[in-house]
Image: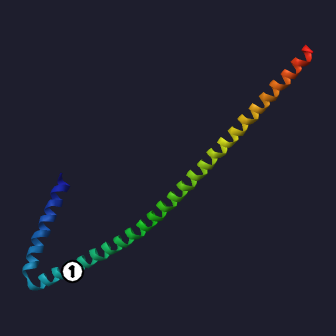
């Protein structure tokens, strides 16, 4: 609590001192110069921030484009894999049908031979 009170007392003293200095023409010039320097500093900081933000947005856009390209490539690869799997399954079914048909024919031939 004591620290807060001392802080508030320091802030109030600073305002009173700045008011007194501002009444004097030389003090007014000094405060105007300090204000101008602070303004220039904040302008430079703002420009640097906007420049950095622009750079970061460029990087983010590049990453988004790369991610979209990877996604499109992955979708195409998945579609190719599905088509390949369908073709392989169709071939397997055809082979199984052919083998079953051959087995039925062989069984029928064997049965005819037994009955003859």
Q: Is residue 42 above or below residue 90?
A: below
Based on the displayed image, in which of its 4 quarters is residue 97 positioned? top right
Looking at the picture, how far across and down is residue 83, in whole percent?
63, 46
Reply above or below: 57 against 23: above
Q: Nearer the viewer, residue 93 or 32?
A: 93
Examine the image and state in which quarter residue 106 appears. top right
Q: Nearer the viewer, residue 63 or 22?
A: 63
Residue at image position (56%, 51%) is: 75
**In the current view of this chain or complex, which residue is farthest to the top?**
115
Q: Give percent across and percent down for residue 20.
A: 8, 76
Q: Identify the residue at horizontal 87%, vertical 22% (top origin).
A: 109
- State left or right for residue 103 relative to residue 11: right
Q: Quadrant of residue 51?
A: bottom left
5 horizontally vs 43: left or right: left
Q: Where 106 sits versus 2, above or below?
A: above
Image side of residue 87 versus residue 49, left or right: right
Q: Residue furthest left?
A: 23
Q: Quadrant of the C terminus?
A: top right
Residue 73 in picture, x, y percent from top left: 57, 55
Other-residue count near label 1 (Cα within 10 Å), few / some / many at <14 / 14–19 / ≥20? few
Q: Residue furthest front?
A: 116
Q: Residue at x 12, y 65 (%)?
A: 12
Colour scheme in the image?
Answer: rainbow
Q: How many marks?
A: 1
Query: Which of 63 and 74 lies nearest the eye of the viewer?
Result: 74
Q: Secondary structure at mark 1?
A: helix
Please give the name of the residue rendered at 84% of the width and 21% of the height, measured from the top-left corner. Answer: 108
Label 1 sits on residue: 36
Q: Position of residue 34 (x, y in %)?
A: 20, 79
């Amino acid at each position: 609590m004591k620290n807060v009170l001392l802080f508030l007392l320091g802030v109030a003293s600073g305002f009173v001192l700045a008011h007194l200095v501002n009444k004097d023409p030389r003090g007014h010039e000094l405060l105007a110069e300090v204000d101008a320097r602070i303004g220039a500093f904040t302008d430079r900081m703002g420009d640097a921030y906007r420049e950095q933000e622009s750079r970061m947005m460029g990087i983010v856009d590049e990453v988004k484009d790369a991610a979209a390209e990877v996604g499109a490539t992955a979708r195409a690869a998945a579609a190719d894999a599905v088509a390949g799997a369908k073709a392989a399954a169709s071939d397997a079914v055809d082979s199984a049908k052919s083998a079953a048909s051959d087995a039925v024919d062989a069984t029928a031939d064997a049965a005819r031979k037994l009955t003859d």
